[in-house]
Image: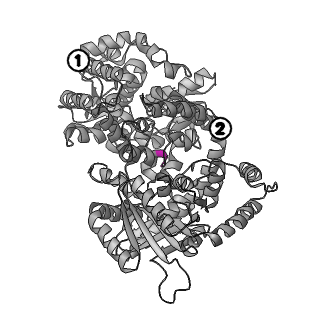
Amino acid sequence: MTATAEQFRRDAALKAADLRHRAVIQKAITTYDAAVAKGKARYADWQNARAHAAAVKWETINHLDRYLEQFERNVIDNGGHVFWAETAEDARRHILDLARRHSVQKVVKSKSMTTEEIHLNKAFEEAGIHSVETDLGEYICQLRHEPPYHIVTPVMHLTKADIAQTFEEKLGAPHTDSAEQLTMIARERLRREFLSADMGVTGANFAIAETGQIAITENEGNARLSFSLPRIHVAVVGIEKLLPRIEDLALFWPLLSTSGTGQALTCYNSLVGGPRVGRDPDGPEEFHVVLLDNGRTRLLADAEQRDALHCIRCGACLNACPVYKNIGGHTYGTTYQGPIGSVITPHLRDAEQWSHLPYASSLCGACSDVCPVRIELHHHLLHNRRNAVRQRFDDSWQRLGFHAWLWTMQSPARYKIAGKLFGFAVPLLGPWTNTREFPELPRQSFRDWWRKHEPRA
Amino acid sequence: MRVSLFIPCFVDQLFPNVGIAVVKVLRRLRVEVDYPTAQTCCGQPAFNTGYWDEARELARRYCDVFSGADAIVCPSGSCTAMVRNFYPELLGAANRVTANTFEFTEFLVKKLGVTDVGAKFLARVTYHDACHALRELRLKDEPRRLLRNVRGLELVEMGEAETCCGFGGTFSVKFPMISYAMDEVKVNSIQKTSAQYVVSGDSSCLMQIDGYLRRNKLPIKTISLAEVLASTE
């Protein structure tokens, strides 16, 4: 077993037994579920919307080369710059170069999992550049030196009291029980950061090929401040974020917010088209898009699992996953948690190191049912498992066991003998029987009964 | 009508009463039942663990064993899904055998058009949706329609009927603590209904739930849907 797998197994066992954690998450997800049910009820035909979205994404991902080049041309025509980053390292280096070239001292960041993926904050810190997360949840994560717990709701695991305590300890803020007060404490500090920042870093929820714009979905208004106040705007965009046409947003904006939070639309949806030009009252002097590959083209090359690139990062599969609800987001040790993370991480990162994640699922399929772009997530977990065995990442005892099992199952005679001996194999189920009672072994099998009761010709 | 039974290996070995109940119900409905004794396992444990070559051998074997059958009936949503939904992926295409394999309640309601099998079971029960029956075979209403027509039976829905019990085959041995936590969430939900029995179409889920109930000495019992439908007293 790899060290990563060992760590996962330990953390998962601890978290699964943490009843306080379970109660906090259950409460958060129950609220979410109610909101999403209402949100979906607003659709005349939710299933049709999913099918349509899946078709648009399929078309985009299968012609990604064309759409990316169209997007690049349009960004440049609008006065922006595009950098193609093959790796996380390329992306970091490019952004740091930009920052140095423009003597950037302070960066404000809006919520972006892509920047988490490339560990941009750490890179800024090492370069002596002050970088501040401005999404409330991400701000709390940053104060606590914790990665986001969830791709959409980064502090789902914290209660109001936990956040109050964090603000007291890290900011010296006065104690309060009021959510409004807590928000005001963050807001007051963040406003100052916005006004003094030299660079704004955002992600993008969608990138529109035909216009060269990026679309940003948010609820707090921090993203629009992040890209409109500082001199330089850098958007780090995964190459799978493309949509062909601007009217596709009419489908994807509500789809994302309905699945993400149950909202018909989030409070703010911005389209960013480039730097300030002519008589624009605001906007950055420079607009840079970093198109990030970082393993995505490996997934693109895999025809069987390519549709995992349809993901719009709504987080619905995390909220639906009974494993996620019991082990929590941090246990995965990945940027993307839950079912989608277990599908894509072995492709995006080291396949062997992360080969345990696809196995950490009961394959219940709840994820695939809620996915707004109809990714068959639990089937991809099966594909990942098969790939792991093909690449010999499996345990050799397990492999031997399945060979012996197959040999047994290929013959009814051997199968019958194995059935009689099954009692001796029960101790092998130790991990299961440690916490649960194994059923009593029956006196006769069904086939024994049948022999006595089969109809005589 | 004549059907061939596919009794999954663990039902055959651990829960023979489920298979016996299926035979009783089908015979009561005047369906001729046959049981090809060459059958063993559908291959799902290997398939789900990533050993597709091994699973493929058993898929071919299954199709051979049942090649003469008009309809194959199986008291497990999970093994039925393996045959009907996943064999085509393993073998490259569906065939007559894979397409004619049905889960027991699905066969009763959709193929025979029967929703009242003349059963009687005096108890308050709650129904646990097995994941593969629910999400691979889309069976939600069929088992409930059958249960509602059982004399003396009161069906109470639990809050998390559709949430996985945490079994998941080798998953429950590889990650026993996650599996146990899921089991606990399930049992908490069952307890809130004050049902006397948890009923399900899949014996593996019931084994998982029963293992928790008995270890924690809870008074709730598990019983398969087939046994409820076979009961007449």
**Residue B91: horizontal and vertical position, in percent?**
20, 38
**Residue A431: horizontal and vertical position, in percent?**
50, 21
Q: Is the residue marked by circle 2 packed among few (<14), some (14-19), or many (20+) residues within 10 Å? A: few
Type of amino acid at the residue the image marks with label 1? Ser
Type of amino acid at the residue the image marks with label 2? Lys
Q: Which residue is mark 2?
A: B192
User: Which residue is at a point 59% across and 32% down the rendered structure image?
Assistant: A14
Nearer to me, A116 or B18: A116
Q: Which residues are drawn in magenta?
A: A334-338
In the shown orientation, is residue B170 left or right of residue A415? right
Taking the magenta stretch, the answer to whether it contains residue A175 is no
Cα separation between marks 1 and 2: 45 Å
Residue A266, image quadrant: bottom right
User: Which residue is at a point 49% across and 18% down the rendered structure image?
Assistant: A430
Tally the numbered discs: 2
Q: Are marks 1 and 2 on the same chain?
A: no
Is A448 situated above or below A31?
above
Residue B47, image quadrant: top left
The prevailing secondary structure element of the residues shown in magenta is loop
Q: Quadrant of the N terminus of chain B?
A: top left
Identify the subunit bearing mark 2: B
User: Which residue is at a point 29% across and 39% down the rendered structure image?
Assistant: B86
Residue B190, image quadrant: top right
Local secondary structure at mark 1: loop
Q: Which residue is mark 1?
A: A411
Identify the subunit bearing mark 1: A
Residue A326: image tag: none
